[in-house]
Amino acid sequence: MLDLNVTLLFQLANFFIAIFVLNILLIRPIREIIKKRNGVMDDMAEEAGSFEYQAAERLTNYEAELARARQDAGSNREEGRAAGAVDAAERGPGPAVRRGLSQSRPGCPGRPPPAGTRRGF
């Protein structure tokens, strides 16, 4: 069985001294390293969050600029069409309209291809 004598007290004292020394040499430095790593990870998580926010903000700005550019292009296209229609109305029908479109463009049905060209493969 277990004898309670002086050696048990020496073993307990030896155990507590070993725990104290290990705490000083190993456990405290490891805890400090873990705290530093956690701090770095928290900083990186904050930075990643700010990058995500900036990316989302830039994306919304880009989409707004793109929508505005499309609207501007559409309005410019409509203005160009209106100006072209007014110009065409002022000039009257052109020579191609008078002769007929099928005769003015090469390769149209009813007109032979130009000399020296081949149709097909």
Image: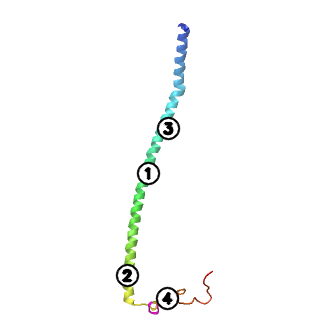
Q: Secondary structure at mark 3?
A: helix
Mark in the foreground, 4 or 1: 4
The magenta span reads 97-103
**Is 107 situated above or below 51?**
below
Q: Which residue is mark 3?
A: 37
The amino acid at mark 2 is Ala
Q: What is the quadrant of the N terminus in the image?
A: top right
* Mark before the other along the chain sequence, 4 or 2: 2
Label 4 with label 2: CB-CB less than 8 Å: no
- Give the Cα separation between the discs numbered 3 and 4: 79 Å
Q: Quadrant of residue 55?
A: bottom left
Magenta region, mostly helix, strand or loop?
helix
Inter-mark Cα distance, 3 to 1 = 22 Å
Tell me the amino acid under the disc marked 1: Glu
Toward the front, the furthest residue is 110
Sequence-wise first label, 3 or 1: 3
